[in-house]
Amino acid sequence: MATGRSNQLIKQIGEYLVACELARRGLMVATFSGNVPDFDLIATDFKGSSCPIQVKTIKGGARQFSIDKFVDITFDGSKQLIGDKKLLPIPQLVCVFVLATEKYGEDQFFVLEWSKVQEILITNYARWLDSHGGVRPRKPDSRHCSIVQSDLRDYKDNWSIISSRL
């Protein structure tokens, strides 16, 4: 089980890996160390245009979320019903998923719009619910969902999305 300290370290590693990669690409980057609710970094070009970025880091496995942050969920008894997508606080937010490794230089980056993350999670959750008749088998009221590396493979090293926002 990960401790609070190890969770903070992996989060910090991911944010600085992304900041370093963006700096290598000629962008200035401000990090906020978790002090801003909806994003972790801001990348800025030489003209002063900026792009807010959310960083999600894991060492392996899946990144966990709660689906009700992305879509309205209601219940018909134990059956979960998926409603409307929730409005995103920052519509142009970019997300970088970092798969952090123990070896320097082997980290992987997956760069996509936060709205695309929302889409992937809702699609996966709906598919999973459908395969179980809309009822979560072990804990019907759970809203747990996750995103795995195979969901992100099309976005590997998609850094151009950030420069296109500037």
Image (cartoon, grey):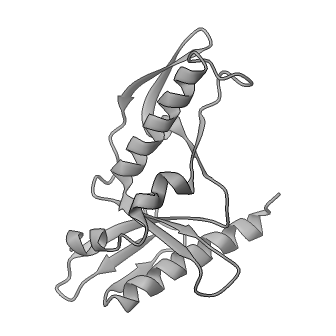
Q: Which residue is more in the foreground, 61 or 14? A: 61
Instruction: Name the outermost residue toward the right.
Output: 1
Residue farthest to the left?
47
Q: As drawn, is 62 to the left or to the right of 76?
A: right
Q: Residue at x 42, y 50 (%)?
A: 117
Where on the picture, by quarter, is residue 1? bottom right
> From the image, which quarter does the C terminus lie in?
bottom left
Above or below, 123 against 99 in this view is: above
82 sits to left or right of 143? left
Residue found 47% across the figure and 42% down from its top: 121
- At a point 41% along the width and 81% down the height, the residue shown is 30
Q: Is residue 57 left or right of residue 40?
A: right
Up the image or down, 40 lies above or below 129; here it is: below
Residue at the far top in the pictured view: 77
Residue 95, percent across and down? 41, 62
Q: How many numbered circles does the render carry? A: 0
The percent coordinates of residue 98 (x first, y second) are 54, 69
Of the pair 43 and 159, the residue shown nearer to us: 159
Q: Nearer the viewer, residue 43 or 79?
A: 79
- In the image, residue 52 lies at what x, y percent? 34, 67
- Position in image of residue 108 (x %, y %): 53, 73
**Residue 85, image quadrant:** top left
Relative side of 2 to 55, left or right: right
Residue at position x 50%, y 29% in the image: 127
Front residue of this view, candidates 117 and 40: 117
